[in-house]
Amino acid sequence: MAEPQTRRAPTQKRSRERVDAILANATDMIAQAGSDALRMSELAQRTGISIGSLYQYFPDKSAVVHALAERCNAESRACIAEGLAAVGSMEALADAFGSLIDTYYALFLAEPVIRDIWSAVQADGALRAMEAEESRRNGALLAARLRMLRPKADAARIEATALLVMHLGEATMRLAVSVDRAEGDRLVEAYKRMAIRELTAL
């Protein structure tokens, strides 16, 4: 299933500013009432543009959610790449991975709108495919660092473990923010222990 895309890619400064305004208003609307309440007509009105102008950039609500999710994903990838960049040992990898998970969890606790965007992604088949691809990208970042640290280890096993660790991390966050805080904290700590144990056993 193809991913939803913007109808017109913003290349000029004015167009980029308009897209930024659309996404900022969409974020505010989702924060206030959840992704289910996002309506294209209201989004156009809040942004101060016609519905036709909105459709030039985003043909439907899925495209808006896709753009918001991709922005979150891009920030996460940058954070992961930065967190792993200086890792030179398995002990350092364990520390860096634990810190990344703590940062990610804190972000989801602090920004409820991210949870709403995530819920919208789960409800749409094309957006779920995007999430799986994002796990692959993040898994590839982790696998690259593992191959450097464990050059004699089986590359296929490294890639499979890294992908699974990253994908299960997303699922853990989704579960952790849906229960009370104390239980969520325990779930995240349990995930970190399991993930680090698997990674350092490679």
Image: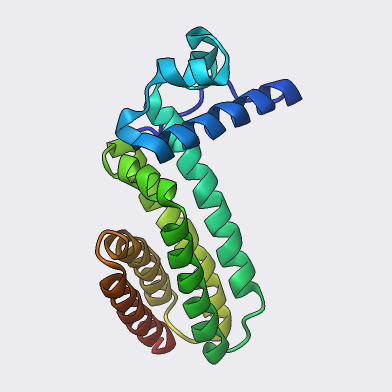
The residue drawn where x is 48% and y is 22% is: 58
How many marks are shown on the rendered structure? 0
| Above-or-below relation of 94 to 68 | below
- Tell me which residue sits at (48%, 35%) in the image: 28
Q: Residue furthest right?
A: 13
Q: Is residue 181 above or below residue 26?
A: below
Horizontal side of residue 196 vs 74, given as left or right: left
Which color scheme did the rendering employ for the protein? rainbow
Q: 58 or 106: which is nearer to us?
A: 106
Image quarter hosting the N terminus: top left
Q: Quadrant of the C terminus?
A: bottom left
Identity of the residue drawn at 29% across and 37% down? 124
Given residues 118 and 112, the one toward you in this image is 112
- Image check: 177 left or right of 64? left
Relative height, residue 175 to residue 29 (above, below): below
Image location of residue 36, percent across then percent down? 30, 32
Residue 19 on image: x %, y % = 60, 27
> Which residue sits at x=43%, y=32%?
29
Instruction: Report x, y in % for residue 133.
Output: 41, 50
Residue 151 seen in this snapshot: no
Q: Is residue 92 above or below residue 187?
A: below
Examine the rendering and report whether any part of residue 146 can be seen: yes
